[in-house]
Amino acid sequence: MHFAFSEQQTEFRDAVRQVLGKECTTDHLRAAFDHPEARGTRWATLTELGVVGLTVPEDRGGLGLGPVDLVLLLEEAGRVALPEPLLETTALAVPLLAGLAEAGGRDAAPAWLDAIAAGSLSAAVADPSRPTAPVAGADGADLLLLTSGTAADGDLELHLVEASSVTIEPVPSLDPTRRLGIPRWTPSAESRVLSGVDAVAAADRLADRAALATAAVLLGLTERMIDIAATYAKERQQFGRPIGSFQAVKHLLAGAQVRLEFARPVVYGAAWALDRSAPDAARAASVAKAYASDAATEAARVSLQVHGAIGYTWECDLQLFLKRAWALAEAWGSAADHRARVLDGLVAGS
């Protein structure tokens, strides 16, 4: 199989990189840490570029594109640790809403898709496999995808709930821009969109999309941490020489870079598999998340070791990316969780 991104896809990525390089600097991230509830102009800018509505169907005002088109943009979002919920809204909520709208399963779905394409609605999505866990982005989202019951008990239900009807209990987060919250709500027939086997199938597809999307963001975070560490190693002097000239430091950074270079094609391959609904798409998504989580945690360890204790201080830019990487490495399944999922699938012959 030969796979390569098209010229249009790489040009779109480059355009987004240029915009985010100006509108999501480390100064902007520090401001978001101090005031995570504040909404700046980035979401509107990304909407104008078509990024927010990229997966929204064309008849609802979006671009109607899929995972292969989105994966590069999520990587760019990771490179700058984008505070806005692009992953939750565009990568996760939109495909579910689009499926409901196509099946006629929820009258409000088309209107919600229109609002997302217009940049006036953001979403938060609960992990069905962790029903009691805090939901990333819940504190500040306009629309929430929540679950009740469990797949194991056969009573899993998916609910779409507007924020105005939910009480969010904020939860302290290592990365304040993710705005964790526990929804306090009561499931109802009016909010329920799927149940039983349909809900389980939708939850499985959601898990695959979430694994891929989170992996893509982790690629960008990994590259940024390595870049920061490499730059610091060129500037920091020890024994009259830049620490980057020492073989031990070179080996640390090279090892982290190798992990990244192995993870990147795996993530791109998973995007291709999901885009085409390949039989092994679920396995590919899990492998991608495992590789990307490993690469990110290794880059975090190495970059922090290169910096020393100063790497975790407020004044150092590295800490902005460390926190997001550590959080996302565990979100939607850790590397160990996804290896176990792959193993279970192989044992079951799927």
Image: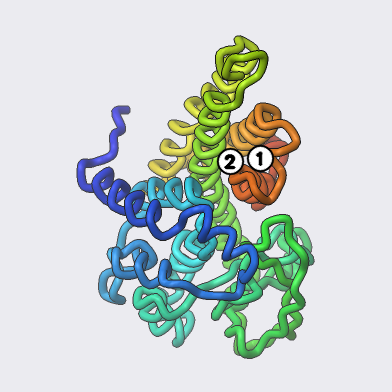
Residue 82 in the figure: left or right of residue 55: right
Residue at 29%, 46% (x, y): give it: 14
Above or below 198: residue 323: above
Disc 2 residue type? Lys
Q: Residue furthest left?
A: 7
Please state which of residues 114 and 169 is positioned toward the viewer in this rendering. 169
Q: Residue furthest top?
A: 247
Q: How is the protein colored in the picture?
A: rainbow
Residue at 71%, 43% (x, y): give it: 312
Residue 1 in the figure: left or right of residue 217: left
Q: Is residue 289 visible?
A: yes
Q: Is residue 333 visible?
A: no
Pointers 2 and 1 in contact (CB under 8 A)? yes
Position of residue 29 measured from the top left corner of the image (x, y, whole percent) = 55, 58
> What crowding class fits label 1: few (fewer than 14 Cα within 10 Å), some (14-19), or many (20 or more)?
many
Residue at 71%, 46% (x, y): give it: 313
Number of the label disc, if any, that sits on residue 338: 1
Decide which of tag 2 and tag 1 comes sooner along the chain. Answer: 2
Residue at 28%, 39% (x, y): give it: 5
Please state which of residues 301 and 277 is positioned toward the viewer in this rendering. 301
Position of residue 61 measured from the top left corner of the image (x, y, whole percent) = 28, 75
Q: Quadrant of the N terminus?
A: top left
Disc 1 residue type? His
Position of residue 92 measured from the top left corner of the image (x, y, whole percent) = 51, 62
- Which quadrant holds residue 109? bottom left
- Provide the residue designation for mark 2: 289
At mark 1, the secondary structure is helix
